[in-house]
Image (cartoon, rainbow, N blue to C red):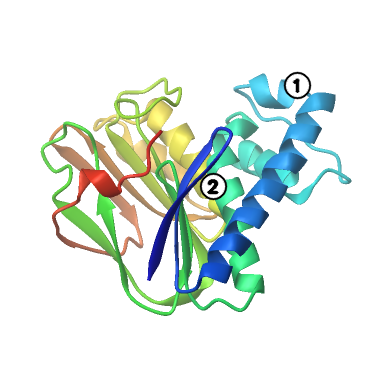
């Protein structure tokens, strides 16, 4: 397996693949999606600044429409979905080249498809469980988004207090948007009530950490003890 760091402007990723050509396909897909988005922002700067949903015209690039759709489902600004959307474009490019395995980690937002079982570590900053557990992701040909938002780790804007909120969906843009949305409002006290908002969405599982409290909802993958290496975490 090849592991390669790739940065393009604000996009900072780790790409996993079996073949160097698949790595190149991932880069090309992500650069194309970023270029499409940047060109759209020149005509609609509000799309980048808004913390509320923003629509996109039917003729907008696919990545822009995916972000807009995600913003309305999760009730956040479209840029909340940018990392997974860019990663999704890279993963689709890998798949189109005939790859049977591909993973892109764009700053904690993971998009993948895989012909093998994978372990995805759970890093939640200073929370007691951080770095000690991992999700077991079974083989799957369908693209999966595993997207995480945190109010205590990383540079992204959050209005909440959660150390980690991870959302699972086969629509990575919506997993990313929902992770941001839930991280803004989740507490141990309101978790069950907030999860009612997720019911009927594209998200099928949520895992949340706030200090020593852990919340679980939906069809989560198996979780096992693990040692998560901080050096493997994609960061700027």
Residue under label 2: 84
Give the CA distance from mark 2 to mark 1: 20 Å
Residue 97 horizontal/vertical position (percent): 64, 74
| 70 or 215, nearer to the observer | 70
The one nearer the camera, 205 or 46, is 46
Task: Identify the secondary structure beneath mark 2.
Answer: helix
- The residue indicated by pointer 1 is 45
> Residue visible at 58% across and 55% down?
88
Asked whether 127 or 198 is in front, the reply is: 127
Residue 99, how many percent across, how many down? 55, 76
Observer able to see residue 92: no
Left or right side of 79 for 114: left
Q: Is residue 200 above or below residue 96?
A: above
Q: Is residue 101 left or right of residue 234?
A: right
Residue 8: x and y in percent read 58, 40
What residue occupies the far right of the structure in this picture? 59
Residue 113 at least partly seen: yes
Identity of the residue drawn at 60% across and 22% down: 51
**In this image, 179 relative to 152: left or right?**
right
Image location of residue 104, percent across then percent down: 47, 56
Question: Compared to 221, does 198 lie above or below?
Answer: above
Q: Is residue 191 above or below residue 232?
A: above
């Amino acid at each position: 397996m090849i592991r390669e760091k790739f940065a393009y402007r604000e996009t900072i990723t780790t790409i996993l693949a079996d073949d160097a050509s698949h790595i190149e396909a991932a880069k090309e897909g992500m650069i194309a999606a970023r270029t499409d988005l940047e060109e759209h922002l020149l005509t609609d700067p509000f799309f980048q600044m808004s913390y509320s949903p923003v629509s996109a015209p039917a003729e907008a690039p696919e990545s822009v429409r995916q972000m807009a759709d995600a913003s309305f489902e999760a009730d956040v600004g479209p840029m909340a979905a940018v990392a997974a959307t860019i990663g999704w474009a890279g993963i689709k490019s890998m798949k189109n080249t005939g790859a049977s395995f591909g993973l892109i980690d764009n700053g904690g937002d993971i998009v993948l498809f895989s012909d093998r079982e994978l372990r995805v570590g759970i890093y939640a900053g200073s929370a007691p469980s951080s770095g000690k557990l991992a999700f077991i992701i079974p083989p799957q040909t369908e693209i999966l988004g595993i997207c995480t938002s945190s109010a205590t780790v990383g540079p992204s804007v959050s209005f909440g207090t959660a150390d980690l909120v991870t959302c699972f969906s086969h629509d990575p843009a919506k997993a990313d948007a929902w992770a941001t949305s839930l991280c803004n409002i989740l507490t141990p006290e309101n978790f069950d009530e907030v999860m009612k908002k997720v019911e009927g969405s594209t998200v099928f599982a949520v895992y949340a950490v706030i200090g020593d409290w852990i919340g679980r909802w939906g069809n989560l993958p198996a979780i096992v003890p693990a040692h998560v290496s901080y050096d493997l975490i994609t960061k700027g």
